[in-house]
Image (cartoon, rainbow, N blue to C red):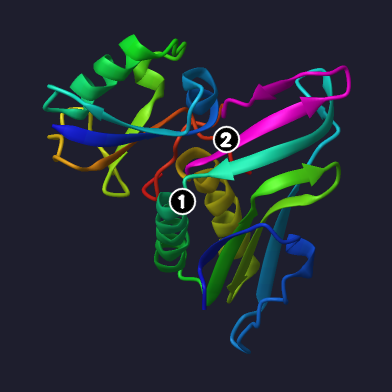
């Protein structure tokens, strides 16, 4: 399926891009992370990263929706 | 009233919170850009956010605080973009009947913003270079 992936903060810097649309055979957010982690030199452990789909936080086991916008986020640091 | 806002404009220019006559206490917290962080001299910083989710999560935090602490009014705002030393990065305003719940709620809201809202900070250093800051806060809950 085709999905659009957006990165923020350190992940955006490490990926060298803010957003990309790609083909994946993954069915969960966790699987999609494995895919993109092979394409980019990410340094953060998955335990530190959060994922969102349809602009809501989602667990790693959540099903990937075709055409979705998936966002991967490094640890937040507001304030 | 907007419970939470993200803005590129200086927070110092925000109009003051209008407070009902029932409120005997108004607690305001300003988070500012500090000169030093973890031994390094900071020249300024940049904030970026995932705006759609940051807006929702910020509103959820303030809405939770209103109910949990029984507040009359509350709001918070966070800056985005480049900030220089001393600039306000975040403001939390809480109006309540008495000061106890006001101080508690204000502290809770800023802690939750720091641990839950998808906002990221990149510091610029006087010696050169930049770094993404990692938040060291553990999430808290309204039950604690």
The residues bearing labels 2 and 1 have C-alpha atoms spaced at a distance of 12 Å
Q: Which residue is mark 2?
A: A77
Residue most extreme to the bottom: B21
Residue at (58%, 49%) from the top-left corner? B110
Residue B90 sits above or below residue B13 on the image: above
Number of callouts: 2
Question: Could one spot residue B124 in this view of the protein?
Answer: yes
Q: Which residue is mark 1?
A: B54
- Check whether the beta carbons of the residues at disc 2 and disc 1 lie within 8 A of each other: no
Residue under disc 2 on the same chain as residue under disc 1:
no
Residue A43 sits above or below residue A72 on the image: above
Q: Chain of mark 2?
A: A
Residue at (88%, 23%) from the top-left corner? B126
Q: Is residue B140 left or right of residue B92?
A: left
Q: Chain of mark 1?
A: B
Classify mark 2: helix, strand or loop. Answer: loop
Task: Answer with the quarter of the image where residue B7 lies.
Answer: bottom right
At label 2, counting other C-alpha atoms closer than 10 Å, the crowd grade (few under 14, some 14-19, many 20 or more) is many
Residue at (26%, 48%) from the top-left corner? A54
Q: Position of residue B58 (x, y in %)?
A: 47, 56
Residue A62 marker: none
Question: Could one spot residue B100 in this view of the protein?
Answer: no
Q: Quadrant of the C terminus of chain B?
A: top left
Q: Position of residue B121 (x, y in %)?
A: 63, 35
Q: Position of residue B100 (x, y in %)?
A: 60, 62
Query: What residue range appears in magenta?
Result: B118-135
Q: Is residue B121 left or right of residue A63?
A: right
Q: Position of residue A72 (x, y in %)?
A: 37, 31
């Amino acid at each position: 399926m085709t999905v659009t992936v957006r990165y923020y903060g350190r992940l955006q810097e490490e990926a060298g891009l803010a957003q990309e649309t790609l083909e994946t055979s993954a069915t969960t957010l966790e699987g999609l992370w494995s895919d993109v982690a092979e394409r980019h030199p990410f340094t953060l452990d998955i335990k530190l990263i959060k994922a969102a789909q349809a602009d809501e936080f989602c667990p790693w086991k959540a099903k990937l929706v075709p055409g979705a916008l998936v966002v991967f986020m490094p640890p937040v640091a507001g304030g | 009233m907007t419970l939470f806002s993200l803005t590129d404009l200086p927070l110092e220019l925000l109009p003051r919170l209008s407070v009902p006559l029932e409120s005997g206490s108004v607690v305001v917290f300003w988070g500012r850009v500090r000169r030093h962080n973890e031994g390094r001299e900071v020249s300024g910083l940049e904030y970026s956010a995932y705006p759609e989710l940051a807006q929702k999560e910020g509103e959820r935090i303030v809405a939770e605080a209103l109910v949990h602490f029984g507040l009359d009014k509350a709001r918070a705002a966070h800056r985005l973009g480049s900030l220089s030393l001393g600039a306000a990065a975040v403001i939390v305003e809480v109006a309540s009947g008495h000061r106890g719940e006001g101080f508690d709620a204000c502290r809770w809201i800023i802690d939750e913003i720091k641990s839950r809202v998808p906002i990221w900070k990149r510091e610029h250093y006087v010696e050169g270079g930049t770094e993404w800051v990692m938040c060291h806060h553990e999430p808290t809950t309204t039950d604690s």
